[in-house]
Amino acid sequence: MSEADFERRLDSVEASVAEKSAAAAAAASASAKPSQGTKAKRPLKLMDLGSWKEKICKLQKEKISPEQRKKLQLRAAQQARRAKMSKKAKRLGAASAMSAKTWHRNQTEVNTVLQTLRRTSDEQEDESTRAQKIGLALKEGRAARQSKSVNVMNLVSAAAGAVFNSAASLGSGSSGYGAGEGGGGAAAMALDEIEEMAQFRSVLAADREMAADLAEVEAAMDAGVEDAVDVVNETDFEKAVSELRVEPKDDEERKEKFKLYEDYAATVEKVRAETIKFYEDSKSEFEGGAGLAMERKIKGIDSEENMGAFFQEGGPWFVLPMIKKAFQNNKSTSGILDEMRRKLELLAAQPDCPVCLEKFDPSIPELTPVVLGCCHKVCAECWANWKRVARGRTTCPLCRNVEFLSIMGVAVD
C-alpha cells in the first residue's frame, strides 16, 4: 500500500468511526424520552464558521504555549494508547465470559437429553439397548455443541490477536501512536480497528446466540454493572455439574461429558495465557500501588492454589473437581481483565475538548463528546465545524495536531 493510499484509508476510517459515533449519539438522544419534570435535549446549534475559527485560533495561540503543546501531544498519545488497551481488555474479558456461558449451555443441553431419556426409558431395557439410545441422542446435537466450543475459542483468539496486533503498533512510552506528527501510530491503530471488527464479525456471524450474549455482557460493562462478566451464577453452575458427580457407566455418555470439560479447559487455558501476555504489554501503564496490586493478581493466576484441583479417594468422578477449578479460574481471569479495563479507562480519561479547551458535558449538545477512531474525543460543535473547515480531510486534531493548526491558520513555533 502506498503512503497516499495509507493516508486516504486512515482518513476514511477516522471519519467513518466518528460519524457513526456521532450518529449513534444523535439517534439515542432523539429516541430517548425525557423523564417527567425534565426538558428534552435541544438540537446542536453551530455558530458562524468564521467566528468559530477566529475563536479557536485565538484560544490555541493564547492558552497553549509551545511547551504545553508538546506535553499535550505526549499526553494525547498516552490517553489514546490506554483507551485502546482498555477496549482490548474489554473484548478479551467478554470473550472469557463467553467461554463459561458456552460450556454451561452445552453441559445443560447434555443434562437435559440424559434426564429425558431416563424419564422415558423402559426399566426392562438391557444395557446394550440403553447405551444405543444414549449414543444416538447425544450424537444428534453433538455437531452443534462442538461448533459452539470452536466458535468461543475463535472469539478468544480474535480478542487476543487484536490485543497484540494493537500492542505492537502502540510501541512503548511516549513514542507510541499519536506522539509524532504524520500519524503513523494513529494510522496503525485505526487500521487495527478495521481488522479487529472484521475478526469479531466473522466469529459472531457463525453463532448468533453467542453474539447476543456478548452484546449483553459488553453493554453491562459499559454501564458499570458490577461483576458484569459473571455470566453463570453459582446456583446455575451447581445445577449444571450435578450430572458429573458420578462417573457414567456408558462409554458414549462418559466421552461426551469429558469432551465438554476438555474443550472448556482448553479455552480457559487460552484466556489465561493471553491475559498474562496482555498484562506484560500493558503493565507500564499501571503506576504505584495500582501497578503492584495488579501484578499480585496476575501472579495469582499461576499460583498452586489457583491451578491445583483436589481429588478425594472414593469421592465424585474426577471430572467434577476439574471442571470446578476451571470455572473458578475462568471467573477469576475474567474479573482481572475487567478490573484492568476499568483502570485503563480511568487512566485514559480525557475531560476536555482539545480544540476549544472546554470541559465535555453530555447534557449540553455542543459539548457532548464525539469519540474518534483513535479513541480521542472532540466536542460535537468543534467536530462539526472542523469537518466544514477540513472539507473532507477530517482527521483527529490531536493525532494530527500540526496539520490541524496549519489548516486553522495557527502559527506555532
Image: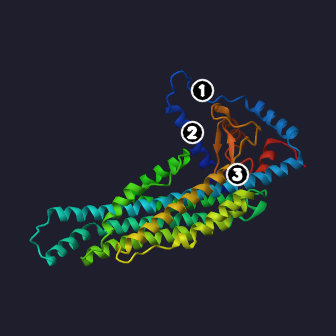
Give the crowd class for mark 2: few <14, some 14-19, many >=20 residues within 10 Å: some
Is 363 on the left-hand or right-hand side of 33? Answer: right
Q: Residue at x 75, y 49 (%)?
A: 398
Q: Residue at x 60, y 26 (%)?
A: 42
Q: Amino acid at mark 2?
A: Ala
Where is residue 183? Give x, y as percent: 73, 57
- Mark number, residue 25: 2
| C-alpha gap between disc 1 and disc 3 | 32 Å
Is 98 on the left-hand or right-hand side of 130? Answer: right
Q: Nearer the viewer, residue 33 or 407?
A: 33
Picture layout, residue 318 above or below residue 211 = below
Tell us which disc is closer to us: 2 or 3: 3
Q: Residue at x 39, y 71 (%)?
A: 261
Q: Nearer the viewer, residue 406 or 398?
A: 398
Tell us which disc is closer to us: 1 or 3: 3
- Disc 1 designates what residue? 42
Residue 136, quarter of the rendered image: bottom left
